[in-house]
Image: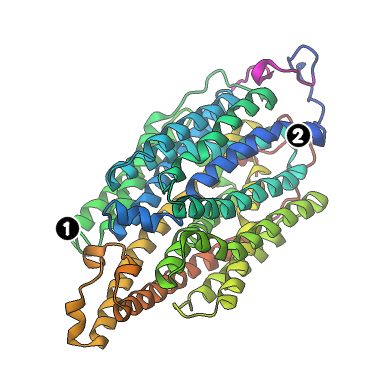
Amino acid sequence: MTTTTPARVEGGGPSQAPSGQAPAGAAPAPMTHPQIMKALSGLMLGMFVAILSSTIVSNALPQIISELGGTQSSYTWVVTAALLSMTAATPLWGKLADLFSKKLLVQLALVVYVLGSVVAGLSQNTGMLIACRVVQGIGVGGLSALAQIVMAAMISPRERGRYSGYLGAVFAVATVGGPLLGGVITDTDWLGWRWCFYAGVPFAVVALVVLQKTLRLPVVRRADAKVDWLGAVLVSGAVSLLLIWVTQAGDSYDWISWTTLAMTGGAAVLGLLFVLAESRAADPVIPLRLFRNKTIALASAASLFVGIAMFSGTVFFSQFFQLARGESPTMSGILTIPMIGGLFVSSTVSGQVITKTGRWKGWIVSGGVLLTAGLGLLGTLRHDTPYWHIAVYMALTGLGLGMMMQNLVLATQNQVAPGDLGAASSVVTFFRSLGGAVGVSALGALMAHRVSHYVEEGLAALGPKAAAMGHGGTAGGGIPDLDALPAPLRAVIESAYGHGVGDVFLYAAPSALLALLLAVFIKEVALKSGPAEHGSVPSAQEQ
């Protein structure tokens, strides 16, 4: 049986107990709304930085990759590298949150992010940029996981829905603000795309200061707890090998080849070794016993497929608007507002209603329906699709994402004991990030293949003279410069990218359907109103 040390308050600030030490056997008094909002201010600013880092470069990526001489594979890996490191680091951050000061860990994650961002802005080639994105991803993984964990440590499950809605609103603002800010920076001659990586640094510094002054949390440490480094290494290796295979297959080697067999076999072996290590570890990075709880198992699986849908939208819309419709980076950000608006509204409204009723399943299931419909309709995209059609499809997608993302974490947190809160929260975030990483890799490879196919078809339709025009930067999978292309060839490229992005969404739609089916089977347990850290919450083994 594990033991815990008495709770103390992080940062040395006042707690509900006068001495800063929680009385033995006593639960701290609930925090008021103003107290919670003050404590969450720095956290939400840190979350804003995390989301901003991934969205601010989305509209700049076509120009970044073109200037650095990268390919469609490079484009995909700039996104995937951050997702990969975020995915691999998330469970470790969650485990560390169960052992050490959550406040200190959030600040550490911010420092890691700042270092990665500063060096990324100095990148001279795509390899250097991808390496810096790995460092950024480690920091962002900490911020994403710890935001949910810190909130859960302060707020009861019943009230948590309200504040999850606030986090969802921050997510939406950063998601829409990032592409707009990135587009403006990229289009401003005296700034340029490198400043996309520097823009989040001031926010991160302010977040560090605000966190130091406002965040006060009880620290509950288990005396016998250890960090499962072996498990962290094995899961990182398995995920990395799988993503490298998905990204390179069909380009560097055939889908059916000895290389494929070696890489998929290696990933499977590492995965089995991870399960074996976790089953024997005294304090595993991902406690397998959590999956005995059906809600956690189903919510984790649903988050995997939601991740595929979420990241496919944020990554490929920039290519659609810039390469299929010839828009500027700034306009590309503006045109995605319907999706972000839907996400903002649904996450905020669902959080408020869930807090009042304690019921969450209906929102998750409805979100799955809307997300499936939105992605299915986006699968019909072509370069000349009327914008109002696209806006409606994006709004449906955003509404679905807002209803599902935060609420799947909320449902999981409601099912675990306080000692497993960090691990359980990070598990759901881990699977969402894993889905995003695998989805971006697989869909990016699919898009490169489909665009090449449609370009060949278009050139063939132009006749023999088309070959003399060259490929305008598309040879070798490069990102084309539309302004440098002759009109007939530009029309071919725009049509190819329009159709290719439509195919990406069409292939992403079944993932949303699977998330919906999994959500249907989750058993709803009304959210509890007890204290967050010391309430009587059944453990996974008791379910």
Residue placed most toward the observer, 447 or 462: 462
Q: Please name the amino acid that badge 2 sits on.
A: Ile
For the N terminus, the quadrant is: top right
Q: How is the image coloured?
A: rainbow
Residue placed most toward the observer, 371 or 497: 497
For the C terminus, the quadrant is: top right
Quarter of the view holding residue 44: top right
Q: Main secondary structure of the magenta part?
A: loop
Q: In this figure, what is the number of numbered marks?
A: 2
2 within the magenta span:
yes
For this orientation, the residue located farthest to the top is 19
Residue at mark 1: 258
Residue 446: give x, y in percent of width and height.
Answer: 34, 67
257 within the magenta span:
no
Residue 353: give x, y in percent of width and height.
Answer: 79, 55
Residue placed most toward the observer, 421 or 443: 443
The segment highlighted magenta reads: 1-16
Give the mark nearer the N terminus: 2 vs 1. Answer: 2
Judged left or right of residue 66, residue 360 is right
Residue at mark 2: 36
Judged left or right of residue 355, residue 57 is left
Residue 365: give x, y in percent of width and height.
Answer: 65, 64
* Residue in view at x 46 percent, y 63 percent: 328
Residue 260: give x, y in percent of width and height.
Answer: 23, 57
The correct choice, above or below, for 392 with respect to 142 in the image is below
Mark 2 vs mark 1: in front: 2
The correct choice, above or below, for 11 with respect to 456 in the image is above
For this orientation, the residue located farthest to the front is 190
Judged left or right of residue 376, residue 278 is left
